[in-house]
Image: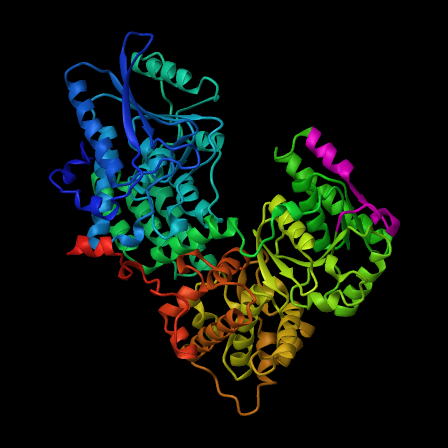
Amino acid sequence: MSQDPTAQYVGIDFTPLLQVSDDEVVTHSYVKDIRLPSGKTLALITLDNGRDHTRPATLGPATHLELAGVLDALKQRAAAGEIDAVGITGKQFILAAGADLSHVDDIPSKDAAKLLAQLGHSTLGRLGTLGVPSFAFVNGLALGGGVEIGLNSTYRTVDSSAAAIALPEVFLGILPGWGGATLLPNLIGIENALKVVIENPLKMNQTLKPQQAYDLGIFDAIFGHVNFLEDSLKWADGVLSGSIKVDRKNEPGRIERTVKWPVAIKIARETLESRIGTVPKSPYAALDALAKAKDGDVAAGFAREDEWLAELLSGDQFAASIYAFNLVQHRAKKPVGAPDKSFAKKVTKVGVIGAGLMASQFALLFLRRLEVPVVITDLDQARVDKGLAYIHDELQKLADKGRLSNDQHNRLKALITGTTDRSQYADCDWVIEAVFEELSVKQDVFAEFEKIVSPETVFATNTSSLSVDQIGAKLEHPERLVGFHFFNPVAVMPLVEVVNAPKTDEATLATAMQVAKNLKKNAIITTDSTGFVVNRVLAKVLGESMRAVDDGTPFSVVDEALAPLGLPMPPSVLLDLVGLKVGAHVLDTHHAAWPDRFYRSENLHRVADNGPLLEKDAKGKVKGISKDAERLVKANLNPGGQPHSREQVLQAVQDGFADEVHRMLEEGVVSAPEDIDLALILGAGYPFQMGGVTPYLDRVGASERVFGGTFHTPVIVGAQTKSKAAEQLVG
């Protein structure tokens, strides 16, 4: 193993990177000597960008170069015997939120991207080559490079109240490239590293709590917030004096490296291929890096990370990921068209009409997030009791997992009631329906409840495709009705489509937006149009897929053809997930609205009526298309239809997407392409690496083919999109 993995970076000129980020908010490295109780001296570096807590410290080129200079000076002091250790911490509540990504679009080439990777290794790697032990005191938020500061240090402590610990790079289309992919598996073992580096980022960027990170072995000690730094310094003194022995139980041994490591990598690769396909690049690059880290050679690992990070940083998927990331971080938090929140009505009691699975999920979500009384109802008491049992069971599971205290559990159970007595809804401020997706049923339900509730009560419909305006046709006050479309599973999917129908008034819309926020959901406002945004796009996928199938194209060919779209699952699995009858209903609804553009499949109805589309094993794993479904479809093909090639299937969906998105924008369903991209990312799981559907359609030429233009100018295509500063750097 190399003794100094940073030796390979000596002599590299990193200053050209400063031209790309000339307005960087520099995180400075302030040094103070701390006299420890034993008499030893620890030089403490505090990272601070001088901003308040709304601007977390980040690691840009100027920040790296300053920190590198400070570490070089401390290495000299260590050699002179002036200090016995080096510590590094952050300003209050924050260590570092990772790399400064504000100028990633300005990286002009793969060579420049590699330079950025090498700079991170050169700087952070110094923490392990000071000649004295280094300690990372992680006092708050640590993401990406913030975690890698700790990994490059000799020892690590963490504040038990830190907001989040994570390596989110795969989520953003890259990999942990400043030591994370090499050092982490050699610290906590390959299975734990796979969870942190790949599994968590692909779960909508799931983060670790400090205790979880400590239990995994990322940190050597965990302390409370009040005396965190003081306790960390005392602990460090104990380590230096030998009175505290650091035991790392999760460090891989010889058997893990030779036997367990390759097996874990193989299983992880098979899992990735089955769940996300092979289009996203970053998960597989990270997987390869983790696989090769088995040799324990840090210098070689850093060099590999340099190459992989350069490749990904300069590629289309990273640029697309940053576009998607900015949508989620900024646009989602300030929904376009939202009224002032001062117009919103206060919600002190919620009524859910229905007690089936979807309705029960609604009730549970409102209960947990709003912590107000929630009442459910249905056609008979047996259905109500079944819904209540489901909610009670889910609350018990949360309590068993420690996510609810006994007091919280008891309080929430007391707040949920079920009844067939409609008068119990009289004092509800918000009433949402989850009844059968049929216009007349929803109309009658609201007309009935309008006679019971207050004139101030807001009505919400969870319709996925019906006209909200028509649903409110029997209401005396349709201005109180708003569309509030959740996505399944309700607790997990972060999007709500808030449908602003023609008669919906400002107070109702404002209340819906505030309710969505209180539910911790992202809301996008749409006009009252069939399918709104997400289902209208997905209907195009399902419709064109079934058109090809009905013309004689095997389901398997259609699934393979659409893999480049990067959708979370192929069409057959999507149909199986939403339910064949639901899928058929969605196609019927869109075909009825636009018969010239949306395909209706009678075969889909036949398969829905006669059995499953997919064959599965005992564990629910998909084995393939059901033979019965294939025979049924083949017996009822379109007269004169010809099987479609993969290229034809893909282009039909691409062009269909471009046409529908363009029409939605012309119709004013939403205000901008960004809103459609955001809706698909949050509501349909469209991957970050694809950057939203509209940049993808521009890149593959579908926009140009369909309407002779593009959704974005310039087209978002990775390192080919340049700024003036980047052009100057190249020149």
On the rendered structure, is 446 left or right of 644? Answer: right
Magenta range: 407-430
Is residue 315 placed above or below 87 in the rendered structure?
Answer: below
Q: Quadrant of residue 337?
A: bottom right
Is residue 253 placed above or below 168 in the rendered structure?
Answer: above
Is 409 included in the stretch rendered in magenta? yes
At which x and y percent is residue 232? 39, 19
Q: Is residue 281 visible?
A: no
At which x and y percent is residue 539? 57, 71
In the image, what residue occupies the spot 34% across and 29% down? 48
Which residue reaches farthest bottom?
Answer: 640
Of the pair 404 and 466, the residue shown nearer to us: 466
Is residue 189 placed above or below 719 in the rendered structure?
Answer: above
Image quarter (top left, top right, bottom left or bottom right) of the N terminus: top left
Of the pair 703 and 119, the residue shown nearer to us: 703
Is 380 included in the stretch rendered in magenta? no
At which x and y percent is residue 316? 33, 60
Q: Is residue 717 visible?
A: yes
In the image, what residue occupies the spot 64% across and 77% down? 593
On the rendered structure, is 143 left or right of 596? Answer: left
Image quarter (top left, top right, bottom left or bottom right) of the C terminus: bottom left
| Colouring mode (rainbow / by chain / secondary structure / one colour) | rainbow
Q: Quadrant of residue 301?
A: top left
On the rendered structure, is 545 left or right of 282? Answer: right
